[in-house]
Image (cartoon, rainbow, N blue to C red):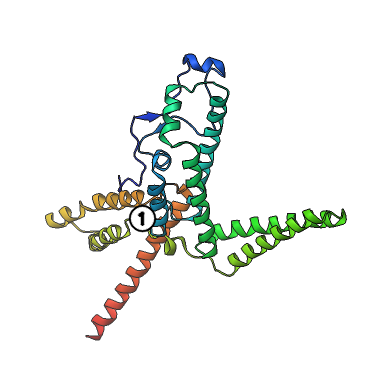
Amino acid sequence: GEEGGGRGVREETLGAHDGDDEDSSSDNLKRRYPLELPLTEGTPEHTVLLASEDTFRNMIDSSSSSSGMCPSWTEKKTCQQLLQNALDTLLVMDGLLLRGTPLSDPDQEFYDAVGGTPAVQSKHDHLKRCMQTQVEEGKLTPSERQKLLKQVSERIDHLNDELQAALSQSREKKAHVLKLQLEKAKTRQSAMEAHPARSPLELYPLKYQSKIQLLRKKLQPLKKLEQSAKGRLLTVKETRELSAMDEIEEEIREWERKSRGWFEGEEEFETRVELARAKFASSSSSSNKGGKSSGNGG
């Protein structure tokens, strides 16, 4: 569902392995694939692999917004690894079929459901292009930019070493190829250096930020009441009002949890949540000061 961010888990599965399957005796008792099977319906992995190519492209292309499937470069990288594991799994299955070894019924069901190698390869290639565009447009967080700049710098050093070795051995064809690769790496490096890193929250606001903001505003007068009530007995009305605080705070935490990206790591998610909290606290503090100033001026 939308609110669950694709993280719901249901019991129906695809590609389950049965250790007692008669077919499995031709290889290992239980086949192991690069992709962990069975897939569980309702998970991001299941959704990505079973979506049609057009649906997948739409999900990725809408990722420029915070409601997209995997808006950040890091999330796209994780999704790309999933697709690569699926490709490697299909390669193993293709090898079995070419040798005349039939797949188990669940494995054949998985193979058919994902559309075979061409469909998954198409998704992988589209995602790779989107990641390249994201780098070129400078839509990178500080940690992403630092990581990618380090990688490209190391690649440039490696290519320079290989180029010098090729030139010293008079291997002109290889040197020509290396020069082209070096030029491409330097262009990539320049493109990244041309754009400053951007705040994760600026690039990808929390999906349910508007709901969270409304609840935080609802919480503010209750917190003020709680502070003012210290050291005195509460009226019945005040007690009733303050009893709603825990419920509102839990609702805020729930909307924060639902704002987590499909392939977003714990650390990246916590960073966005903390930035959102700090931003609200800062804007709230500014508006309070402004209100007091205008009040005194009137």
Image quadrant occupied by the C terminus? bottom left
The crowd level at tag 1 (other Cα within 10 Å; few <14, some 14-19, many 20+) is many
Residue shown at 49% from the left, 51% from the top: 126
Q: Is residue 220 left or right of residue 167?
A: left
Name the residue at 38% across, 29% down.
13
Furthest residue in direction left, as rendered: 236
| SS label for mark 1 | loop
Q: 274 and 172: which one is in front?
A: 172
Does residue 270 appear in the picture of this structure? yes
- Residue depicted at 37% across the width and 48% down the height: 55
Of the 4 image quadrants, the one containing the N terminus is top left
Q: How many marks?
A: 1
> Which residue shows up at 34% across the image and 52% down it?
256
Residue 141 appears in the figure: no
The one of 60 and 221 positioned closer to us in this rendering: 60
- Determine whether, in the image, residue 107 is placed left or right of residue 289: right
The one nearer the camera, 192 or 223, is: 192
Q: Is residue 185 above or below residue 69?
A: below
- Along the line of sight, which residue is nearer the eye, 147 or 2? 2
Q: Position of residue 16 (x, y in %)?
A: 43, 25
**21 relative position to 156: left or right:** left
How far across and how far down the image is residue 221, in percent? 23, 63
Q: Work out whether 261 lies above or below 95.
A: below
Residue 46 rendering spot, x and y as whole percentages: 40, 38
Task: Report the amino acid beneath label 1.
Answer: Ser
Q: In the orientation shown, which residue stands out farthest toward the bottom?
A: 297
Report x, y in % for residue 218: 23, 61
Dividing the picture into quadrants, the one containing residue 25 is top right
Q: Is residue 172 above or below residue 115?
A: below
Residue occupied by mark 1: 67
